[in-house]
Amino acid sequence: MITPMSEPPVAIRAMSHEDLPEVSDIERRSYEFPWSHGVFRDCLLAGYQCIVLEREELVAGYSILSVAAGEAHILNLCIDPTHRAHGYGELLLDAILGVARDADVEEVFLEVRPSNETAMALYRKKGFHQIANRPKYYQSQHGREDAAVFSKKLGNDY
């Protein structure tokens, strides 16, 4: 009998300055117009809620959350392209929503490219609803791309 190999365990923890080279590398490999190393550094310095997902002691994903006045904004959530399709995005989203809940946030917002169907499906699965469209929000190879604005009210369950 052959037994399937299980996935290595993952851990989610606060992002540190030492994580920035790995986070920046994942960002560059994931997006045509990535955030710079300095943007991630500034998020840490500003006190944003920054977390990483580790697999086998290597950063495999990250998320950045800004919290103010009972609201939160997911500024970035990304899984390393080599670690996608394992459910890590959902784990990371659940974790950042937990951070928002711990901060007594009532509603969470985010923007996503409509062309990112995988992300949009995940956000809908987790109870987010599209509330607006921001024309020409994202830079793209062919000019600008709109952003779909999503929100989720935090209740007792995700």
Image (cartoon, grey):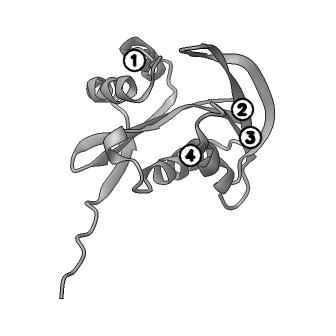
Please name the amino acid that badge 4 sits on: Thr
User: Against 100, is 45 above or below?
Assistant: above
Q: Residue 101 in the image: x percent, y percent?
A: 63, 48
Ranked by sequence position, the earlier of labels 3 and 1 is 1
Residue found at the very far bottom of the displayed protein: 1
- Cβ–Cβ under 8 Å for marks 1 and 2: no
Report which residue position mark 3 lands on.
Answer: 151
Q: Which residue is mark 4?
A: 118
Where residue 146 appears, x then y in whole percent? Answer: 70, 23
Q: Tell me the CA gap for discs 3 and 1.
A: 26 Å
Q: Is residue 71 above or below residue 46?
A: below
| Point 42% across, 53% down: residue | 85
In this rendering, which labeled residue sits more in front, label 3 or label 4? Answer: 4
Badge 3 or badge 4: first in the primary sequence: 4
Please tell me which residue is depicted at 65% across the width and 56% down the height of the picture.
125
Q: Of the residues tagged 1 and 4, which is closer to the observer?
A: 4
User: Mark 4 packing: few (<14 Cα in 10 Å), some, or many (20+)?
Assistant: few
Q: Say which element carries label 3.
A: strand
Residue sitting farthest toward the right: 131
Q: Earlier in the sequence, mark 1 or mark 4?
A: 1
Q: Is residue 18 visible?
A: yes
Q: Say which element carries label 4.
A: helix
From the image, tell me which residue sits under label 1: 41
Check the image and report above or below for 21 versus 50. above
Residue 148 - label:
2
